[in-house]
Each structure stands twice: as structure tokens, then as C-alpha cells.
Image: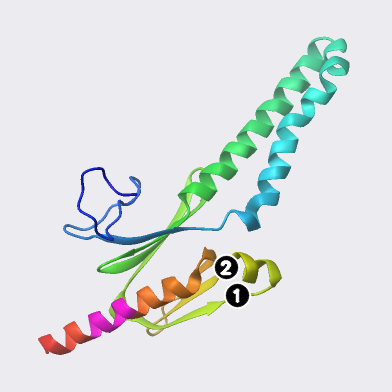
Amino acid sequence: MKRRGARSTNVMDAPKYIELKAREQVLEVVQAALLPNLWKFVLCTLWTVLPFFFLFPLWRQGTWGVVVFAMWLVCGILLLWRLCVKWSRTVFLVTDLRVIDHDQRGFFHRVVTEARFEDIDEVSVSVKGIVATLCRYGLLTLHLHGSAADIQIDQVKHPEHLADVINDLRSQAREASHAIS
């Protein structure tokens, strides 16, 4: 997203729930592709709509029928809301200083992993399957120095482009560190 009136640059705004360092600029904001998760959204939507097909039989049961209908509907709405929150708040950011993987796993559970470009040994891309190839999404893996766990971002749109951006920034970080020493 670009601000209105801002100069035409590649700098983007970071999501509000991610704190950046001073003078850090966001270059890429990537979310998981919607297509592989579409079946979850369809199932949750069906679960939310399904009690309306049993509206009259449930309401004829009296108070208990109305309670079952309401609980079923609330459960469906909460499941759909949870799925939307998880999908919308799971993002991968590439800044000019580091990469940040913000993984929302539930309402109150998130895992944030970050790595500086100097700590990344290798960037690999894996696209598996016909649908993933046609829709251009895949797995991006960042292999880190030493015993640090690798960062894997699944269902990334255009993973080759993102790997190129990260590799370019890795090269710039290495050149800058060699120039200093």
C-alpha cells in the first residue's frame, strides 16, 4: 500500500501490529496465497450458514432449539473470524535491514521470527503440484547460519521474485560488511 501524495518508491507500509526499528523501510509485504486456503473458508462459511437450513425444525423444539441454533451460529461465526484473523495476520516482511516472519496461529498465539541478511546462508524455492505451478505459489525457505532454525514460508505468491529480492539484499549486506572491514 502506498500513501497518497507520497513519492513513487518501492517502500510499503508495515502492518500496525509489527514494530519496525528506527529508519527501517519495508520493501515487501507477503501474505499466503488465498487459493490453497479457500477450502477452509468454504467449509467455515458452510458451517456458519448450515443452521439456517434447520431454522424452523430447531425453533419448533422451543427454547432448546433456539439455544442450539444460536450456539451453532455463534460457533460458525467464531470459526470464520478466527480463520480470517489467522490468514490476514500471517505475513512475511522484507525490510532493508532484515526479514520478519509473523505467524498468527490463533487469537492469542503468534510466533515472530526475524533474521538479518548476514545470517542467511541460502534461499531456496519449492513449487510442488499443478495448481501451485499454474497459480504461482510455493514454499520459500531461508537457511540460516549455525544451529538456528530455518525459516519456512509456505504458500507464498511469486516465490522466485521474493527469493531474488532477498538474494539481492544479501549481496548488498555482504558488500557493506566487506567495505567496513
Q: From the top left corner, tell me how far across and down residue 74 is, in percent.
A: 66, 27
Instruction: Specify the color scheme.
Output: rainbow
Q: For the magenta stretch, what is the residue range? A: 168-174
Give the spatial CA distance, label 1 vs label 2: 8 Å
Image side of residue 137 versus residue 122, left or right = right
Q: Residue at x 25, y 67 (%)?
A: 96
Residue situated furthest left in the rendering? 180
The amino acid at mark 2 is: Arg
Is residue 132 left or right of 53 when viewed as pictured? left
- Mark 2 lies on a secondary structure that is loop
**Would you say 22 lies left or right of 160 here?**
left
Q: Amino acid at mark 1?
A: Val
Please name the residue shown 32% across and 79% down the image: 168
Mark sitting earlier along the chain (1/2): 1
- Residue 106 visible to an observer of this rendering: no
Magenta stretch: dominant SS? helix
Q: Residues within 10 Å of mark 2 (few under 14, many from 20)?
A: some
Q: Are marks 1 and 2 in contact (CB under 8 Å)?
A: yes
Pair 1/2: label in front: 2
- Which residue bears the numbered disc 2? 136
Whether residue 8 is visible, yes or no, is: yes
Who's the residue at 44% across and 56% down the image?
91
**Vertical position of residue 72 compared to residue 147: above or below:** above
Q: Is residue 12 above or below residue 177?
A: above
Quarter-of-image position of residue 56: top right
Tell me where residue 102 sits by quadrant.
bottom left
Q: Secondary structure at mark 1?
A: loop
Front residue of this view, candidates 105 and 172: 172
Vertical placement of residue 72 versus 63, above or below? below
Which residue is labeled 1 in the image?
127
Q: Local crowd at mark 1 within 10 Å, few (<14), some, or many (≥20)?
A: many
